[in-house]
Amino acid sequence: MNHGDRAYRALHLALADADAPECSGDDRFILEHHELAADEVKHLRLTVCGPCPLRTLCRAYGDAARPQAGIWGGKVYPPPKPRKRAEVDQ
Ligand code: SF4
């Protein structure tokens, strides 16, 4: 089990013991990162994730797994930019 799996398990267990978080059923929280404007993510981070009691575990999962869709603990994880090839002297 890797770090992302352990973080997901911890979040899953906490969700089972908690009331449904405010993001539950809100489609904005499962969109791919390019489908959300930065100001919308900021708004959701402050108003929904900020007061969420699961935020620490949710962010820990996001930081560990870097899911390519969704908002996790108020954060999105866009894919890494492709590396530029190093120029080779000829
Ligand atoms: S911190 Fe995670 S569980 Fe809580 S509202 Fe935000 S996305 Fe949902």
Image: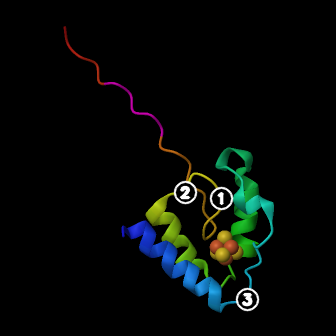
Where is residue 53 shown, x and y percent of the image? 64, 86
User: Given the image, on which type of amino acid does mark 3 rest?
Assistant: Asp
Instruction: Please report the residue visible at 29 percent of the width from the left and 24 percent of the height from the top.
Output: 86
Residue under label 3, please give it. 19
Region rendered in magenta: 81-85
- Prevailing secondary structure class for the magenta stretch in the rendered image: loop
Q: Earlier in the sequence, mark 3 or mark 1?
A: 3
Instruction: Please report the residue visible at 60 percent of the width from the left and 78 percent of the height from the top.
Output: 55
Ligand 1: image quarter: bottom right
Residue under label 2, please give it. 67
Residue under label 1, please give it. 70
Where is residue 34 shown, x and y percent of the image? 68, 44
Q: Quadrant of residue 20?
A: bottom right
Q: Quadrant of the C terminus?
A: top left
Where is residue 3 shown, x and y percent of the image? 38, 69
Q: Is mark 1 within 8 Å of ligand 1?
A: yes
